[in-house]
Amino acid sequence: MVLPAFHSDRFSPRRAAAALLRCALAVALFSCTLALHAEDRAVKDRVPPAYPEIAKRMGITGVVEVQATVAPDGKVIAVKTVSGNSMLASAAQTAVQHWRFVPGDSQSTVTVQLNFTLNR
């Protein structure tokens, strides 16, 4: 039985299943892991980086190391790339800029390594 509200020339269960499979495959094809080196500043809220589409298409992977300056209230006030591929660096900086750390006594510098990998 086909429900009229869900049946049209543009939408079909087969197309929906194919779209869902493509989405799951895209998530499985890339991932990003990270290593955090901080001076007694734990991460309270982490935002994962968005893997740049062009980097995925070109098969670019690698570690991006960024330095974040963290205010006493835990907000990131500055981020700069220390090393890594420039195509991935922008995504790493943007993600870390939105992180929140546990409040501390003073401003501190935190070094974060984000590992961009493509799973095949």
Image (cartoon, rainbow, N blue to C red):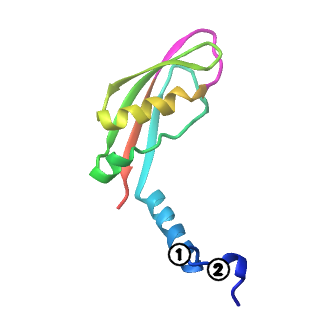
Alpha-carbon neighbours of circle 2 within 10 Å: few (<14), some, or many (≥20)? few
- Front-lying residue, 11 or 58: 11
Label 2, label 1: how far apart the Cα atoms are: 11 Å
Of the two numbered discs 2 and 1 on the same chain, state the one appearing first in sequence: 2
Q: Quadrant of residue 102?
A: top right
What percent of the width, then of the height, locates residue 34? 45, 39
Q: Which residue is mark 1?
A: 15
Q: Position of residue 82 (x, y in %)?
A: 34, 23
Label 2: state its secondary structure: loop
Residue on which disc 2 sits = 7
Left or right: residue 90 versus residue 86 is right
Q: Is residue 98 magenta?
A: no
Residue at position x 41%, y 53% from top? 30
Location of residue 26 in the rendering, given as x and y in whole percent from the top left corner: 44, 59
- The dominant secondary structure in magenta is loop
Q: Quarter of the image containing the C terminus?
A: bottom left
Q: Which residues are magenta?
A: 101-110
Image position of 26 (left or right of 62): right
Residue sitting at 60 percent across and 25 percent down?
101
Residue ID at (47%, 31%): 94
Which residue corresponds to the image point at 54% horizontal and 68% vertical from the top-left?
20
Magenta span contains residue 109? yes
Specify the farthest residue to the top: 106
